[in-house]
Image: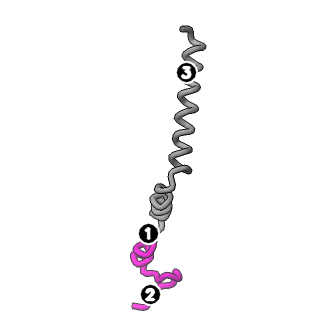
Amino acid sequence: MDINDLRAIVTVLSLLTFLGVVWWAYGVKSNKKRFEEAAMLPFLDEEADWAELGLDRNGKRKAS
């Protein structure tokens, strides 16, 4: 076994790993809901941030 055989094995393993990740991300339908929830995480605290700044949903100052 020389270095070229090792390179071929690593290339094939890398391709299989890549295809596995693509299948996991796009092929498994049960992950869709979880991924959509994760995509919305940055926006969950938006109302708390506005309240902390004393703003309403439109970005205007709340009447105190």
Residue occupied by mark 1 = 44
User: Relative to the observer, which residue lies in front, 52 or 38?
Assistant: 38
| Viewer-side label of 1, 2 | 1
Q: Is residue 63 above or below residue 36?
A: below
Give percent across and percent down for residue 57. Answer: 49, 81
In the rendered structure, which amino acid carries the disc numbered 2?
A: Lys
Which corner quadrant of the image does residue 51 belong to?
bottom left
Q: State which tag comes first along the sequence, 3 or 1.
A: 3
Which residue in the protein does label 2 denote? Answer: 62
- 51 to the left or right of 23: left
Q: Secondary structure at mark 1?
A: loop
Measuring from the top left, give residue 39's x and y in whole percent.
Answer: 50, 60
Q: Position of residue 42 (x, y in %)?
A: 47, 63
Q: Indicate the secondary structure of the residue bearing disc 3.
A: helix
Label 2 residue SS: loop
Which of the numbered marks, if any, corresponds to residue 9? 3
Q: In which quadrant of the rendered view does residue 10 lie?
A: top right
Q: Residues within 10 Å of mark 2 (few under 14, many from 20)?
A: few
Badge 3 amino acid: Ile
Say left or right for 45 vs 2: left
Residue range of the region highlighted in magenta in the rendering: 44-64
Please state which of the two labelled residues, at mark 3 or mark 1, is closer to the viewer.
3
Quadrant location, the N terminus: top right
Mark found first going from the N terminus, 1 or 2 = 1
Which dot marks residue 53?
none
Is residue 46 placed above or below 14 in the rendered structure? Answer: below
- Residues 46 and 11: in front is 11
Residue at image point 57% right, 26% down: 12
